[in-house]
Image: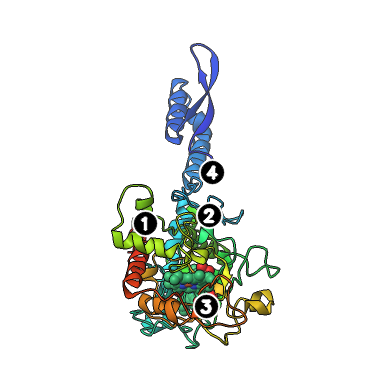
């Protein structure tokens, strides 16, 4: 909506001139009222007064357009963002999305029985880097299941940070990507719908989700602020939640502050960083980034040698059709990695120590292993216990406490 002002032509009787002025609805009425009195024709002006009062009321009902969201891109991060043209981020949209993301009725259940409720944050917990966590009250084993079906999810939960910078495809196998021929699997908006309706996740339907959100009187005004009218639709729910997910950015860790010269790393952390970024050291940087690729992932897909015989049929090869992609998955970002347990596509490791032991001595060779796993012939990098501790200390510097609450 434009603004709350009315342009009227003010008659100035003394000078006999007419000029245009901007008045608030209240002032406009007062002026007309005054003019009417001056002319001693109050009753004659009554229709005009009522007409203006009507405009004033309708103007007050309209609202300002939503405020563009100022996404803070951390220093050195990519500036090309994955935001669909039909869903620009707004302050009001992100805020609505935040509420919906955490709303346990989004699954379509309007009762109060705790086990029948489920929100996005049942599995994507902010304090766990929007991952499931190994101490999840609903899924103590870290293995999520469908709300009403009890059906286990195909894979471990993924953290939801810095997704707006990913152009390579979402989900472990990259099933959701922007030029997917399947137009229902292209965007985070699509993932919202998939999560609400999947029988291994929220087990809702579009109709029950919309009805459950409609039943909460706090929402219509918030939809109006975000989208212009109070109408609640699945499309708007998807858009708002996707906006919120895109607003989740981790880029203010101790390591970032070190790069900006604001904080020092300890000698141990610094040595861990050197190991991380050298081939003869821990050799992690090819797939998980470094100072030069600050997402701490390439967002690309690799087989990192977890299994000699990959068995999961929903791996990268299920998307590309390429048998070389057996056992390949997207390399997760290592930002906030201390918080995102359990680890790997199947959540097989509960702790970071287990992950580091794997890369150190348990790497499995196979025809599918990434050529970037340079130490595969030795089964791993074989760091000393001290070096392992240094590497772990460095990984700890990638935690952005401002995003974990
Ligand atoms: C029952 C647990 C569960 C719930 C509830 C859930 N998710 Fe997920 N989510 C997962 C799992 C598991 C994956 C990994 C899927 C895969 O790759 O197989 C995932 C992946 C994602 C991804 C992809 C992340 C990436 O980096 O590629 C996004 C985005 C996402 N979820 C958003 C949501 C939103 C939004 C909601 C609520 C509408 C939601 N999820 C509800 C379990 C859940
Ligand atoms: C060849 C590429 C590659 C190299 C080199 C590599 N990784 Fe990975 N990393 C991956 C992939 C791919 C995954 C996901 C694999 C899966 O889930 O099956 C992964 C997963 C992880 C995870 C689990 C993250 C999560 O949220 O589940 C951690 C932690 C990790 N890597 C740390 C490291 C460290 C530390 C090094 C160096 C010692 C390293 N990686 C070397 C590709 C690589």
Label 3 vs label 4: CA separation? Answer: 62 Å
Mark 1 or mark 4: which comes first in sequence? 4
Q: Nearer the viewer, mark 1 or mark 3?
A: 3
Q: Secondary structure at mark 3?
A: helix
Identify the residue at the far right of this view: 181
How far from the left and from the top, in percent, is residue 284? 47, 67
Which residue corresponds to mark 1? 255
**Can you tell which mark lies on residue 227?**
2
Q: What's the residue at 46%, 59% (across, down)?
A: 290
Q: CA distance from mark 1 to mark 4?
A: 45 Å
Identify the residue at horizontal 71%, vertical 68% (top origin): 181
The N terminus - image quarter: top right
Query: Which residue is the site of mark 3?
Result: 376
- Dot 2 alpha-carbon crowd within 10 angstroms: few under 14, some 14 to 19, many 20 or more: some
The image's mark for residue 1 is 4
Whether residue 204 can be seen here: no
Decide if residue 361 is on the left or right side of residue 364: left
Decide which of tag 2 and tag 1 comes sooner along the chain. Answer: 2
Q: Is residue 154 visible?
A: yes
Dot placed on the residue nearer the N-terminal end, 3 or 4: 4
Tell me if mark 4 has few (under 14), some (14-19) or many (20+) residues whose alpha carbon lies within 10 angstroms of its own. few
Q: Is residue 243 above or below residue 340?
A: above
Q: Secondary structure at mark 4?
A: loop
State if disc 3 and disc 2 touch (CB < 8 Å): no
Is 52 in front, or is 306? 306
Q: Nearer the viewer, residue 358 or 191?
A: 358
| Above/below status of 27 relative to 316 | above
- The CA span between labels 2 and 1 is 39 Å
């Amino acid at each position: 909506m434009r603004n709350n002002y009315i342009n009227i032509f003010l008659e100035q009787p003394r000078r006999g001139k007419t000029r245009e002025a901007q008045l608030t609805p209240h002032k406009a009425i007062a002026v007309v009222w005054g003019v009417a009195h001056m002319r001693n024709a109050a009753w004659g002006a009554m229709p005009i007064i009522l007409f203006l009062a009507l405009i004033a009321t309708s103007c007050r009902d309209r609202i300002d357009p939503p405020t563009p969201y100022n996404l803070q891109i951390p220093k050195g991060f990519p500036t090309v963002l994955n935001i669909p043209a039909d869903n620009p981020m707004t302050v009001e949209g992100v805020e609505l999305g935040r509420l919906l993301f955490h709303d346990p009725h989004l699954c379509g259940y309007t009762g109060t029985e705790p086990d029948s409720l489920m929100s996005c944050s049942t599995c994507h917990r902010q304090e766990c880097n929007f991952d499931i966590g190994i101490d999840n009250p609903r899924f103590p084993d870290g293995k999520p299941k469908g709300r009403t079906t009890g059906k286990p999810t195909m894979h471990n939960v993924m953290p939801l940070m810095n997704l707006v910078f990913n152009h390579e495809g979402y989900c472990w196998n990259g099933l959701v990507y922007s030029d997917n021929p399947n137009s229902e699997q292209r965007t985070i908006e699509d993932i919202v719908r998939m999560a609400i309706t999947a029988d291994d996740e929220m087990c809702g339907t579009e109709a029950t989700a919309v009805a459950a959100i409609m039943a909460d009187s706090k929402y219509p005004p918030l939809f109006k602020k975000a989208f212009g009218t109070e109408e609640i639709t699945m499309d708007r729910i998807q858009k708002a939640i996707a906006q919120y997910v895109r607003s989740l950015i981790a880029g203010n860790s101790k390591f970032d502050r070190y790069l900006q010269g604001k904080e020092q790393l300890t000698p141990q952390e610094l040595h861990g960083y050197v190991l991380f970024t050298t081939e003869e050291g821990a050799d992690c940087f090819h797939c998980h980034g470094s100072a030069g690729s600050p997402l701490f992932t390439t967002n690309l897909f690799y087989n990192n040698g977890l299994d000699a015989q990959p068995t999961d049929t929903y791996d990268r090869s299920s998307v590309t059709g390429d048998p070389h992609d057996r056992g390949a998955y997207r390399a997760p970002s290592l930002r906030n990695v201390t918080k995102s347990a359990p680890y790997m596509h199947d959540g097989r490791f509960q702790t970071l120590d287990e992950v580091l032991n794997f890369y150190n001595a348990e790497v499995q060779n196979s025809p599918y292993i990434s050529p970037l796993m340079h130490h595969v012939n030795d089964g791993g990098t074989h760091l000393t216990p001290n070096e392992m501790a240094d590497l772990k200390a460095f990984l700890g510097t990638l935690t952005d406490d401002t995003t974990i609450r």
